[in-house]
Image (tube, rainbow, N blue to C red):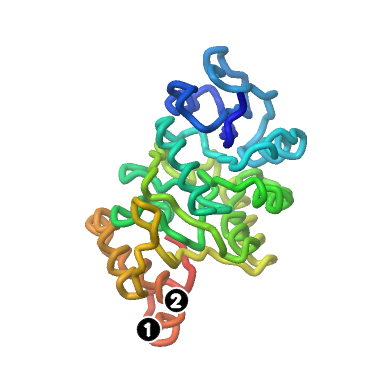
Amino acid sequence: MQHRHLVIARVGQNSLHPTWLGDPATRNWDLYLCPFQALLPHAAAQATLGEVIVGPKWTGLRELLNAWPGWRDYDYVWLPDDDIFASQDTITRMFETAAALKFDLCAPALHEASYYAHFTTMRNRNTFARMTGFVEIMVPCFSTRALDVLLPTLDLTTTGWGWGLDSLWPKLLEYRNTGIIDGTPVLHTRPVGAFRDAELGQRVMDESDRIMHVHECRQVHTTWSAFGPDLQPLGLVEDELTVKLLDGWRYLLDGSPSLVRWIVAAQYPSIVARDYPVAGLPASGAAF
């Protein structure tokens, strides 16, 4: 029997997707493996195994999503990297939360022990979910409607790495119904931005810059509102929300105090640009 939601994992021989699996009768999602290399037979347990598509993550997903219409039979589709450690129950709760909050684009927050690139993707301990302007390409989850709308953007990444798409997607969705789910954190186990050579890294970064320039978008790390464990809005006004966020990310600030400036700049971009044009302070929408 088909479940309501779908996980499509771009996987290799060292993929952590087996950690996601438990009793299939207690989950609300199916698993489809899109391998970039041949897998051992046991790696496809409790999953549908697709054909091998050589290349980076978004090259394979673009080919699969355009060729196989079956994903459109689901309510939500999660497209995680293969170095994510998570439990079946966490993924199930993520889908339940996404549906309850009517997110069109979202992601589970990254566990406190994760390697990360952007503070806003990390778990905030004071919120269960947040409405945000940025959802990283590492573990994005889409409503089927939104994925159908955004699918043509995968043609923009000729490298297949997808950098820059996570700045474009929220803009195309008019920054509505996009968020991070702090209550269902997953662990990212590998350092970010590790390229096999400098030339590839430069091409990926140039592609990201080009996507953002051509489409006039940027990383928007603002959190606009937050929800508690009951999925009800916390009802915080602007300053109260900022204080709540800073306290919830205190574990990050203890190791990197300069993050305070980035968080404040994200929460008050217009005020920072107008009143505090201080050298070293991040520009509106800057990434961390």
Q: Three-letter amino acid code at disc 1?
A: Tyr
Q: Position of residue 230 (x, y in %)?
A: 36, 52
| Residue lying at 50% horizontally and 42% vertically, measured from the top left | 95
- Viewer-proximal residue, 201 or 248? 248
Q: Name the residue under label 2.
A: 269
Q: Position of residue 267 (x, y in %)?
A: 40, 71
- Viewer-proximal residue, 104 or 11? 104
Q: Where is residue 19 in the image (x, y as percent from the top left)?
A: 42, 26
Q: Which residue lies furthest to the top in this view?
A: 41
- Residue 197: numbered disc: none
Q: Name the residue under label 1.
A: 276
Q: Is residue 288 left or right of residue 136?
A: left
Secondary structure of the residue carrying tag 1 is loop
Q: Nearer the viewer, mark 2 or mark 1?
A: 2
- Residue 156 visible in the shown view: no
Q: Three-letter amino acid code at disc 2?
A: Pro
Name the image quarter holding the N terminus: top right
In 3D space, how far apart are the residues under numbered discs 2 and 1 (Cα atoms)?
10 Å
